[in-house]
Amino acid sequence: ADRLVVAVDGPSGSGKSSVCRAAAAALGAAYLDTGAMYRAATWYCLREEVDLGDPEAVAVAVAELPLTISTNPDHQVVTVGEADVTAAIREATISEKVSQVATNPEARAVLIAAQRRIIDRAGFIVAEGRDITTVVAPDAQVRVLLTASAEARLKRRGAQLGGTQDPEALRRQVLDRDTKDSAASNFTEAADGVAVLDSSDLSFEETVESLTSRVLLAQ
Ligand code: C5P
């Protein structure tokens, strides 16, 4: 097919980004990390000294966000204007503040429109986030909710951060973000027609394999 959209949603720490990137690379598909777009928008608001508590100011800033994001699964680059923010958007300050942008309806509308353009242009793409199966691309041929138990997610996020985090702080960080994110979209239950892929007891490779085989079946 010349147009095949794979929509994947899931909570933070579900391994979503690495699984989707690996699946896209294996399939020869493009890859879109929509969380990176919310992160870049947050980075921009902070640089422009926008008051994140002021929804109108946030909406105005995001409407003029000069964002580019690569869709090559092997080469992820995010820029805001002249600045390469690929690394900066992963910092803890961004993770803490991103929900203030993500819960802003006008900011979401701007980013969702951009995501739909990227998906349309790519044709064959794995797009991941919190609302891809439900809002951004509900017509995707493959729609998957990637879940993992809170325990498994905490373990993975801890390993990702080098295993040096205080376990209690980590638990608070991951579960706090779940709570904040659930205000913007419901990604913990699968919508009608969305398949649940629970990775709690799967290895990384098994999870990638499960996703790619669903795509190959849909092709
Ligand atoms: O996936 P990641 O953790 O990088 O996403 C960062 C944040 O962006 C999430 O915590 C959530 O607030 C927001 N987000 C969203 N909708 C998406 C993707 C991400 O609200 N589709």
Image (cartoon, rainbow, N blue to C red):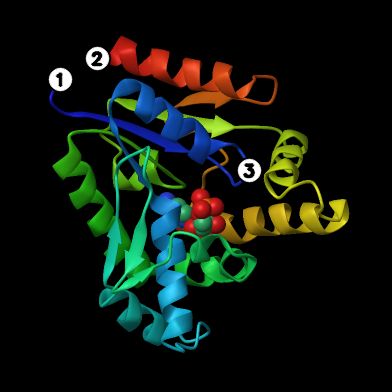
Q: Which one is earlier in the sequence, the residue at label 2 or at label 3? A: 3
- The disc labelled 3 sits on which kind of residue? Gly
Which image quadrant for residue 147?
Answer: top right
Q: Which residue is mark 1?
A: 1
**Which element is circle 2 on?**
loop
Residue at image point 36% right, 59% down: 78
Horizontal arrangement in the rendering, residue 39 relative to residue 12 (left or right): left
Where is mark 2, residue-wise? 219
Asked which secondary structure carries label 1, the reply is: loop
Residue 206 point in image, percent of width and height? 57, 16
Q: Are marks 1 and 2 in contact (CB under 8 Å)?
A: yes
Sooner in the amino-acid sequence: mark 1 or mark 3: 1
Q: Quadrant of residue 141?
A: top left
Residue 86 vs 189, above or below: the answer is: below
Q: Is residue 104 above or below residue 77?
A: below
Instruction: Look at mark 3 in the image and give the residue it sits on.
Output: 13
The residue sitting at 22% across, 48% down in the picture is: 118
Q: Nearer the viewer, residue 101 or 70?
A: 70
